[in-house]
Image (tube, grey):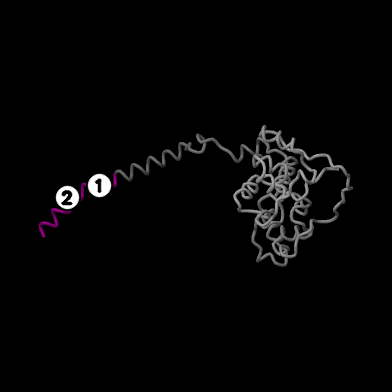
Amino acid sequence: MAQQLLMPKATAIWLVDNTALSFDQIAQFCRLHPLEVKAIADGEAAQGIKGLDPIATGQLSRDEIARAEKNPAHKLKLSEPKVRVPESKRRGPRYTPVSKRQDRPNAILWLVRNHPELKDAQISRLVGTTKSTIEQIRERTHWNSANLAPMDPVTLGLCSQIDLDMEVEKAAKGRPLPTAAELGATLQSAHETERLTPHEREEEKEIDADAVFAKLKSLKSSPKDEDEDDQY
């Protein structure tokens, strides 16, 4: 059973305020994005949340913190719990607060458009929806399709950036690599794209020659026209 950190954001606040750990170390330990930890340090995020001491809760030791402060490459590890609590298995899609449920279709549309490699089960885990809803949005048969606008689920607060990156990485591993024929059909060298056929070169020369003769003819005729104007 994997150990879970209690109150990750509150723990991150305490680590930012009371240790010299890097943002990456805190983000890895609290399962947050490094930019989110930086926002906490700058006072732009998690305002009003009281920091939680992981040493007091027995989830981190002082020696482990000191070891990580000396070595920026060291990853913090949870302390072994004194009491084992059985992990409760979650059934069904992720619970979404009522205030954010109306944003779910927009998030699904964003995922379908920007990450078509994601499976329906992965989208369900990210935003807490059903496969039938995903199919309706993908096929534009959803009852509110005309009013939907793609929106990032991370920005909407439906999932974290780490969860999204993990699902995208899983989907990318199972996706086959493009074949040489596919790459050749889409990519061409600069020499090939700029090269003209002999017929195109002859047409280009003819066009240039006509333009030059027309210009010379206009220059020759202009003095004669001026003389005729002077006579009148």
* Amino acid type at mark 1: Lys
* Residue 109 placement: quadrant: bottom right
Which of the numbered marks, if any, corresponds to residue 173?
none
Is 61 covered by the magenta stretch? Answer: no
Q: Would you say the magenta stretch is mainly helix, strand or loop?
A: helix
Q: Residue at x 21, y 47 (%)?
A: 220
In the figure, is residue 44 to the left or right of 99?
left
Is 217 covered by the magenta stretch? Answer: yes
> Where is 152 relative to 58, above or below?
below
Percent across and percent down for residue 114 are: 66, 51
> Where is 61 relative to 41, above or below?
above
* Element carrying mark 1: helix
Over which residues does the magenta segment extend?
213-232
* Residue 65 placement: quadrant: top right
The quadrant of the picture occupied by the N terminus is top right
In the figure, is residue 212 to the left or right of 165?
left
The quadrant of the picture occupied by the C terminus is bottom left
